[in-house]
Amino acid sequence: MALYEALFLALLVGAHAELPGCKIRVTSKALELVKQEGLRFLEQELETITIPDLRGKEGHFYYNISEVKVTELQLTSSELDFQPQQELMLQITNASLGLQFRRQLLYWFFYDGGYINASAEGVFIRTGLELSRDPTGRMKVSNVSCQASVSRMHAAFGGTFKKVYEFLSTFITSGMRFLLNQQICPVLYHAGTVLLNSLLDTIPVRSSVDDLVGIDYSLMKDPVASTSNLDMDFRGAFFPLTEKNWSLPNRAVEPQLQEEERMVYVAFSEFFFDSAMESYFRAGALQLSLVGDKVPHDLDMLLRASYFGSIVLLSPAVIDSPLKLELRVLAPPHCTIKPAGTTISVTASVTIALVPPDQPEVQLSSMTMDARLSAKMALRGKALRTQLDLRRFRIYSNQSALESLALIPLQAPLKTLLQIAVMPMLNERTWRGVQIPLPEGINFVREVVTNHAGFLTIGADLHFAKGLREVIEKNRPADVMASTAPPPSTAAV
């Protein structure tokens, strides 16, 4: 009995679980590019390592090693992989670090000093980034695991006391190797939990699209990694800025991502576009009014001729009044995505009236318009853009079939009006696009759009328009170490 209750509860929860409107998959094809940019960033971070001064005494010899700096990182072998439990794992083997430090030696009354070049060889680093969703729906690096070790060090001592330094080199290099081992992991922990999180902070979560609507890209759950990809589910819902708590129920098909040939895939369901159109509808943006000179001259003459019988019955002061043509969408438009293409269905009212100065307007006719638009999606940089085209158009009267027949001569001129005056305004806005959830400095290139039943996918490659260092320096917080103590290296010294 308990088993049936558990199954029923699971089905009930699943039935009410909110579905994502947008999904993003990063595949293993992107890892080489990410690794190259990441290693440049890692090298710059390791150069910030600060090693405490090393002082000691052997017999009558007093030595002091100070101002130790990492000057370069040379890689022999490195791998970046997805791991189901750790999300991203970077492993560097048999690398070397170039160092420079200041030496000081005192023997009785004899003193020697100068700068020495050294190298740390057999460097091993294994670090993992764990990604999760924070309470605001933002993706964060929640933990960094680290193992690091330096197997040997070599210092090119010279000068008057070269033989003495060679005698002391075992003590000095062993001490430096110990200190270096203790510094690598804290630097990587700070780079992950502070610096990389400042990069992830540039991904939009809830942001304004324009003066009317905003978009919610909050993560719905923690990112999920497999051995070949990293999947992220975003809410992908628009909302009117005047109703920030409003939410459209998602009853669309859940988008699916199966492909792995490109670096990244983005999927959008019908809900993503429906929420955009309903948000603009609720914001009062889906209406247009043309008065007087704004109505094309030929259409003005045709409308006056069509309603001549009604106009001549009006008073002389009204007959020559400016003509008004008003289009108002009656219900939120609906998007339908099929393998053959994407269409948007719109139902609107068309009102024709005369507007005499300082008098109430006189309505000549009111009709209903059904239109079907084709929509072509494209991804440019980080913006999802849409090109609309009017495909089908029909006007009819709600009063009688006879009046609908009388409207047939107006159908072609009104369709031309939509194509000339309305569609360019719509496309000017939709082609500006809406940003998708990507960090600053990373863009999409070579995109391919594929339609499915109920959703569409866009496969693309990644391009770093800015380096990680440039973006992080622009957005980095106060440069303090993370409050949580970083895990020390677990590798043996």
Image (spheres, rainbow, N blue to C red):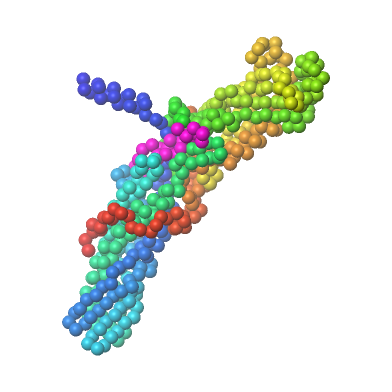
* Residue 128 percent coordinates (x, y): 31, 51
Q: Position of residue 193 (x, y in %)?
A: 35, 52
Q: Which residues are magenta?
A: 216-245
Above or below for 105 versus 471:
below
| Residue at the image position 44 percent from the left and 42 percent from the top | 205
Q: Is residue 489 visible?
A: yes
Position of 197 relative to 46 (above/below): above
The answer to which image quadrant residue 473 occupies is bottom left
- The quarter of the picture where the C terminus appears is bottom left
Q: Is residue 416 visible?
A: no
- The front one of 64 and 226 is 64
Say left or right for 7 vs 474: left
Asked whether residue 7 is drawn in magenta, I would say: no
Identify the residue shown where x is 76% and y is 18%: 307
Is residue 16 or residue 374 the one in the foreground?
Answer: 16
**Which residue: 76% across, 32% down?**
293
Residue 127 location (% of width, % of height): 31, 54
Residue at 31 percent of width and 47 percent of height: 86
